[in-house]
Image (cartoon, rainbow, N blue to C red):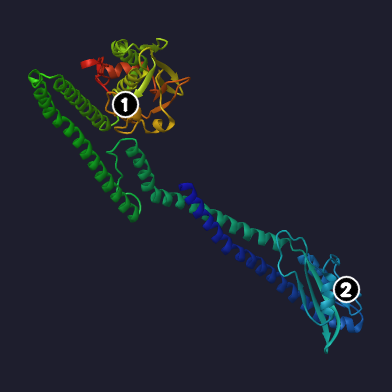
Amino acid sequence: MRRRLVISYLLLMVLVLIALETPLAFTLASRETDRVRADRLADATRFASLAGPALRGGSPGPLDGELAAYDALYGIGAAVVDRERRTVAASSAWEPGAGTGAALDTALSGQQFSGPESVWPWDGGPVVTAVPINDGGEVLGAVVTTSPADGVRRTVSTWWLLLAGIGLLAVLACVSTAFGLAGWVLRPVTELDAVTHEIAEGRRTARVRPRLGPPELRRLATSFNDMADAVSDVMDRQRAFVAHASHQLRNPLTALRLRVEELGPSLSDADGRAEHRLALEETDRLATVLDALLTLARAEREENQRVTVDAAATAASRVAAWLPLARHCDVALRLDADGEPVYARTVPTAIDQALDALIDNAVKFSGAGGEVTVTVRAAEGGTTLTVRDTGPGMTASQLDQATERFWRAPDVQNVDGAGLGLTIAAVLVDASDGRLTMRQGEPRGLVAELWFPAPAGDPGEACETAAADGSVEAAEPVGPRRDGEPATR
């Protein structure tokens, strides 16, 4: 943007210089030519006054000496012709050339002639002047001079080069001033753009310095900071409300479950016991939803601190943690990795929780006899973790809605879950500048792919340093809870 602004300033300056200097250049050329033409006309008029007696008497008299001295002193050829265009007297440098005939025609008609109107640097013709020789109103002949225009061309060229130099200096001054002015004007815009990207990436504390640039942009920066503060406050209040509500509801929910459990021994008929069992299951389901909401609120509150983790080791620990549930569901769960460390740069626990959500869904929906494969590879300048299952998969429209809060496919409404697992995984992956993509498997099933950026520098050293200061949390195995229900959704 700065380049475009400077170019616009520069273009305006060049147009102004052209508009001012072009007429001035033509005026200087015309003025210098007029000066030379006036001098030549004065000289030719003097020769005409001397040539009158020579033409009447038929002898040149002192005219030849005057013309020779003029030629020797100034190098200008001159000649005196009669009305029949015969040369009466001429200097040694006199040579008729282009324009001489027209000059004689004008002079013999009784008028003075001098040309051209202006001498240009690229024009090689001489300055030609012709003055009539009058005697009592009768034209007896004419005096013609041809003056080389090299001096005029040099003078005009010098003036034009001086104008060009002044214009170049003005352009350089304009460019220097334009860069400073554009920087002063655009600095708050540039900072506003950078801060906007930082806020979009999750650094909600970033703000614009309000004392940069012109007053209008200062007010814009102040308004932007006020808006960012308001939005950040609203988001904090919303997330705090979700977290507090989820936490506060756990105590009455626990008390409710205990009271429902205490009703069990007093129920004697089969229908009552069945309703009692369903009530307990609903309280367990509500507890799961509250846990997921709490996890989501914490994930969205992350300030995007990045740590370096070994994705292969993390994937191995998550597969090991979910193996008991997979065996219980008669699902083959395996890890496909080459055993070498594969490092990724993420927010804390992003890989752990994302894999928990994906493996949970894969095992849950693959069904008895199904297969779930977790693959870890270095790809696309980062780390790719793929969870592939042999379940029913999802349609294209379902894939578009899969990461929405509380969304569940219509045909799995009776399956345990809160509809927040993929939402939490998407939030953590996005906060890590990664990608979560899902597609239909071939010939069936679902393929969920996580991609995280690779760390800069020596990943092994960074990972060891992070682990030493406790910023990388070890992945605790998450086993199944009551009735085989996993701890994380």
Identify the residue position indicated by label 2 in the image.
Answer: 89
Q: Which circle, 2 or 1, is nearer the viewer?
A: 1
Q: Position of residue 449 (x, y in %)?
A: 41, 23
Identify the residue position indicated by label 1 in the image.
Answer: 306
Seen in the picture, residue 113 relative to 311 is either above or below; the reply is below
Q: How many marks?
A: 2
Task: Kindly identify the residue that appears in the image at 39 percent across and 28 percent down.
Answer: 435
Q: Tell me which corner region of the image, top left, top right, bottom left or bottom right, holds residue 327.
A: top left
Q: CA distance from mark 2 to mark 1?
A: 102 Å
Q: Position of residue 365 (x, y in %)?
A: 35, 20
Q: Amino acid at mark 1?
A: Arg
Seen in the picture, residue 14 relative to 143 is either above or below; the reply is above
Label 1: state its secondary structure: loop
Viewport quadrant of the C terminus: top left
Q: Amino acid at mark 2?
A: Ala
Horizontal side of residue 423 vs 3, given as left or right:
left
Mark 2 neighbour class, 10 Å CA radius: few under 14, some 14 to 19, many 20 or more: many
Q: Tell me which corner region of the image, top left, top right, bottom left or bottom right, holds residue 135.
A: bottom right
Q: In front: 11, or 123?
A: 11
**Residue 409 visible in the displayed image:** no
